[in-house]
Image (spheres, helix red, strand yellow):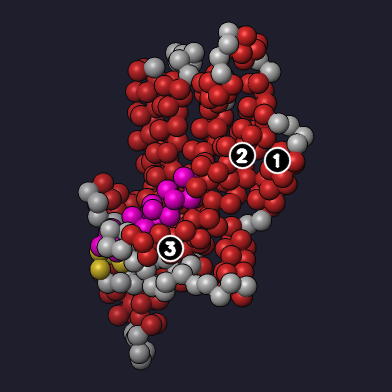
Amino acid sequence: MRQYAIKRIALFVPTVLLLTVIVFVLMSIIPGDTALAILSDGEGSFTQKELKDLRHELGTDRAIAVQYVDWIWGAFRGDFGDSTWFNAPVMTELKTRLPRTLELAVLAIVLAVALSVPLGVLSAIRPDGWLDHSARIFSLVGVSIPNFLFAVLIILFLVQLFGWLPPLGYAELWNDPGTNLKQMAFPALALALYDMAFIARVTRSSMMEILREDYMRTARAKGLSEKTVLLRHGLKNASLPILTMTGWQFGRLFEGAVIIETIFLIPGMGRILIEAVFQFDFPMIQAVIVIIGTGILTINLCVDLLYGWLDPRIRYN
């Protein structure tokens, strides 16, 4: 297990480096000129000399390899450069927005797991019952409706049918927890719908397979309570596919937050990414994508390392 953990952690670093290379190269070759976008936003015309001088000041007139080396060296020190839109360091903006996106993702995955795992277990215990049929219908609907459409439906139904709106603006969690949870509850629900449906289906399938194993019948024959049999012997052995799916879905939440934050006006990393795309703010776009991608890779690494802890039968060469 220790050798496997060392290999996985050692592989993590070049994977992140490859991610930064891909992101930087794509940002460099896509159409768009940051210097031209900045000068075009100003009033009046500009000369070619002014355009050339601004490109030199931004460093976009140098070779891509040179630009990447300077950028990645700064990124390792927590400096992703200056935002051409905010005229301020990129991390100055992201330091306040990252916790908001992280809070939304954590609330969504907690909500998804708390509702889907019990639903999947109950469906597996009583197959073909009304609860099982209801859970299967919910799963099909959940994986069929996009997150952004469900978010719009939530807003429409709450406003049109119940006349309810969350408090406008945004309250920080540590300043006003009550208002913050009211504002984040429905975005988290919209973001968690697909994950709830998917995890519930995986839980049901895993539990139904485990319930047919011989050791489950042996545990009941020993006189153990049904609760102990299901939780200690059933759910624990079915946890690996559930953990795999939960880790993958948790990574997906950071991608879905881009749209959900825009719909619910949450000033997080997803919303600033959308705004940076329209403003050709390449330093901000690169930083957001790299941070989100590194977070997803970190989650996958943690899931892999948890396998050996959850199931001692797993051995790695």
Residue 116: image tag: none
Range of residues picked out in magenta: 90-110
Residue 264 is left or right of residue 121, and the answer is left
- Residue 9 in the image: above or below residue 143: above
Q: Secondary structure at mark 3?
A: helix
Residue topped by disc 1: 131
Whichever of labels 2 and 1 marks the residue nearer the N terminus, that label is 2
Question: Which residue does the image show at 75% across and 36% down from the upper left?
Answer: 129
Q: Residue furthest right?
A: 128
Question: Disc 1 marks which amino acid?
Answer: Leu
Question: Disc 2 marks which amino acid?
Answer: Leu
Q: Position of residue 232 (x, y in %)?
A: 51, 21
Q: Position of residue 79 (x, y in %)?
A: 25, 55
Q: Secondary structure at mark 2?
A: helix
Q: Is residue 97 magenta?
A: yes
Where is residue 200, by image quadrant? Answer: top right
- Residue 56 in the image: above or below residue 197: below
Question: Which residue does the image show at 48% across and 67% down from the upper left?
Answer: 264
Name the chief secondary structure element in magenta: helix
Q: Position of residue 177 (x, y in %)?
A: 33, 59
Circle 3 packing at 10 Å, graded few (<14), some (14-19), many (20+), is some
Whichever of labels 3 and 1 marks the residue nearer the N terminus, that label is 1
Quarter of the image with the C terminus in it: top left
Where is residue 182, by image quadrant? Answer: bottom left
Q: CA distance from mark 2 to mark 1?
A: 8 Å
Residue topped by disc 2: 119
Residue 299 is left or right of residue 95, and the answer is right
Q: Residue furthest bottom?
A: 44
Quarter of the image with the N terminus in it: top left
